[in-house]
Image: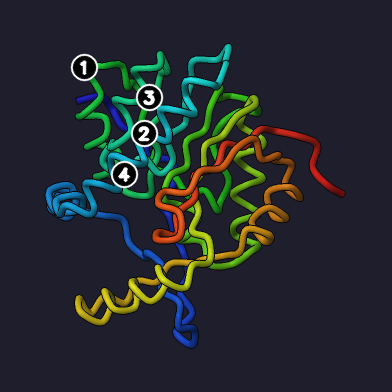
Amino acid sequence: MEKVQYLFILRIEFDPGSNQMVKKHAFQSQEVAEYEKKRYRNWDQRLVDRREKKILQTYLSKIESHCPLLLDLPCGYGRFISLSLTWGYKVVAADLSPAMVARALQRGRVEGVTEGVVLDALLGLPFKDESFGLILAMRFFHHLHQEEERKMVLHEFWRVAQKDMLLSFYQENIFHRAQRRLRRWIKRSPTQIKMISWGKFHREVSEMGWAVVEKKALFPGIHSQIIVWLKKSKPES
């Protein structure tokens, strides 16, 4: 297996007085195996997986990049690696979990993934300015509950990107919020995600120097996830 470069271990503080819980620990090897086995096993999650990849495929067919490097953050167990490689990118797999990065490299090593980095995006990205032709940030934004955290990450993405980013977030949706509350009650899960309005999302990305090129809802009116194609612009003062 390729050598994994351990730069940072993610640390996200949790305020015991808050009712918001975000991921506090890096997945261990056994947890990664269980997560990969179960996460998209049910029919509804398989549908989500297919729809996400279809939307990304549409965006990738439109993006023109002269730099072959793609930053996949968080890479998870490498769910989008094959798709990224199909479009000719060299993937840098980054995540808070060493075990996740190792699994992503294991899945992609035959196809061209050569770099893995364990990092904390909130501490800054250990890359030079404009290193990447494309940034892929799927299922990350909704774990950032504070505006300051989201803006910090957007700033770092802006710094290391040459031009384009594909990013997902959860837009306010009453139906999906009720569905998640029911699911948390049934499964006794403490994890909560952050949903924000389109207006708030648009303001935050604009202030950090990103312009919205296109947006696509996963399942309009039913599911909160929106996948957005962003392009670098001048940050708002």
x then y, percent, for residue 6: 37, 39
Q: Which label is found at residue 84?
A: 3
User: Which residue in the protein does label 4 denote?
Assistant: 76
Q: CA distance from mark 3 to mark 4?
A: 14 Å
Q: Nearer the viewer, mark 2 or mark 1?
A: 2
Residue in the image at 20% along x and 76% along y: 187
Q: Earlier in the sequence, mark 4 or mark 2?
A: 2
Q: Earlier in the sequence, mark 1 or mark 3?
A: 3
State whether residue 33 is above or below residue 67. Answer: below
User: Is residue 169 left or right of 175 when viewed as pictured?
Assistant: right
Tell me the kind of residue under disc 2: Lys
Say if mark 2 contacts mark 1, CB within 8 Å. Answer: no
- Residue 159: image quadrant is top right
Is the residue marked by circle 3 packed among few (<14), some (14-19), or many (20+) residues within 10 Å? many
Q: CA distance from mark 3 to mark 2?
A: 12 Å
Q: Earlier in the sequence, mark 4 or mark 1?
A: 4
Secondary element at image label 3: helix
Say if mark 4 contacts mark 2, CB within 8 Å. Answer: no
Residue in the image at 41% along x and 18% along y: 90
Q: Earlier in the sequence, mark 3 or mark 4?
A: 4
Q: Nearer the viewer, residue 63 or 122?
A: 63
Secondary element at image label 4: loop
- Residue 79: image quadrant is top left
User: Which residue in the protein does label 1 denote?
Assistant: 110
Which residue appears farthest toward the bottom when viewing the image? 17
Tell me the kind of residue under disc 3: Ser
Q: Earlier in the sequence, mark 2 or mark 1?
A: 2
User: Which residue in the protein does label 2 denote?
Assistant: 54
Is the residue marked by circle 4 packed among few (<14), some (14-19), or many (20+) residues within 10 Å? many
Q: Nearer the viewer, mark 4 or mark 2?
A: 2
Say if mark 3 contacts mark 2, CB within 8 Å. Answer: no
User: Is residue 229 left or right of 176 when viewed as pictured?
Assistant: right
